[in-house]
């Protein structure tokens, strides 16, 4: 990255000649997260010619551009002014939707729940309880297929990733790593420990958008048994 410029709330750096990276520099983590997503939404709404894709994360936004349609330096100036106009204290979502996600936890030891519990010095039941307690705010959408990226449950320590990633993780897997948690909407390789699976269909390529949630919405996990898993298998994920 080169040619970084700073304002009171962001630092903007060029990434080659086809992208800008905007990093939030507010002292409050929550305000930084809100600012990045408000900025991404404002950029999408502005429909700036040449802006190909806007990708917000926890504390940054990547703006991919067509350099033949927009001058990166001009765009950087516009983004800086736009960022300074945003009220980072304003809620990202006025009425967040709540998605209840049933989970068949890995009580039989097929996946990684037992090893996660052992590494944390806890019983399996403790991991299930701690994972199911919070209301998780969706922080951003990740790979694959718009995975809802969540702050992790209150485990005693960060969860180590697998030493040997799986070549194939099926859709619907519920996983944790570090201080984060997520659901896998589409089959993909993955190195996060799997603690359960949901019967819900999260990704629907025939709908718009492809996933039913957005950053700022809320996910709750609920433990189910195998009979309920079979009864709900294939049900689309919808807000309560």
Image (tube, grey):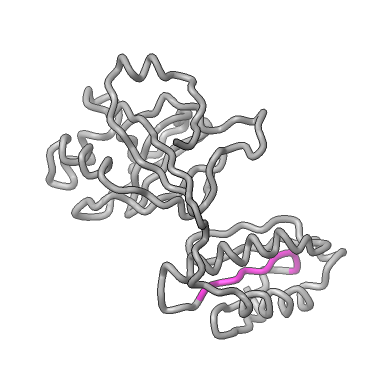
Image quarter (top left, top right, bottom left or bottom right) of the C terminus: top left
Position of residue 155 in the picture relative to residue 185 (left or right): left
Q: Residue at x 48, y 65 (%)?
A: 33
**Residue 144, how many percent across, how many down?**
54, 40
**Residue 162, how many percent across, how many down?**
34, 42
Is 69 located above or below residue 95 in the figure? below
In depth, the one of 203 and 163 nearer the eye is 203
Task: Report the label total.
Answer: 0
Magenta segment, prevailing SS (helix, strand or loop)? strand
Q: Residue at x 20, y 40 (%)?
A: 129
Magenta stretch: give its range.
17-24
Is 96 located above or below residue 49 in the figure? above
Position of residue 64 in the picture relative to residue 163 (left or right): right
In depth, the one of 160 and 219 nearer the eye is 219
Q: Residue furthest front?
A: 95
**Residue 233, how many percent across, how many down?**
44, 19
Position of residue 21 in the picture relative to residue 64 (left or right): left
Q: Could you say which quadrant of the image residue 56 lies in? A: bottom right
Residue 118 part of the magenta-drawn span: no
């Amino acid at each position: 990255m080169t040619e970084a410029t700073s304002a009171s709330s962001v630092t903007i750096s060029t990434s080659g000649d086809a992208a800008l990276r905007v990093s939030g520099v507010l002292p409050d983590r929550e305000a930084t997260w809100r600012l990045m997503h408000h900025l991404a939404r404002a950029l999408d709404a502005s429909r700036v010619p040449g802006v190909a894709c806007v990708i917000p994360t926890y504390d940054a936004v990547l703006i991919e551009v067509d350099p033949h349609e927009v001058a990166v330096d001009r765009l950087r100036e516009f983004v800086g002014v736009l960022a300074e106009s945003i009220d980072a204290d304003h809620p990202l979502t006025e009425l967040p939707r709540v998605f209840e996600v049933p989970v068949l936890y890995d009580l039989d030891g097929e996946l990684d729940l037992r090893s996660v519990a052992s590494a944390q010095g806890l019983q399996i039941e403790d991991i299930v309880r701690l994972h199911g307690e919070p209301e998780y705010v969706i922080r951003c959408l990740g790979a694959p297929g718009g995975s809802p990226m969540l702050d992790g449950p209150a485990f005693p320590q960060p969860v180590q990733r697998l030493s040997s990633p799986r070549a194939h993780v099926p859709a619907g897997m519920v996983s944790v790593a570090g201080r984060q948690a997520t659901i896998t909407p589409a089959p993909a390789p993955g190195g996060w420990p799997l603690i359960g699976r949901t019967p819900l269909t999260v990704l629907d390529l025939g709908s718009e958008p492809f996933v039913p949630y957005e950053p700022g919405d809320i996910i709750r996990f609920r433990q189910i048994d195998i009979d309920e898993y079979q009864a709900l298998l294939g049900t689309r994920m919808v807000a309560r």
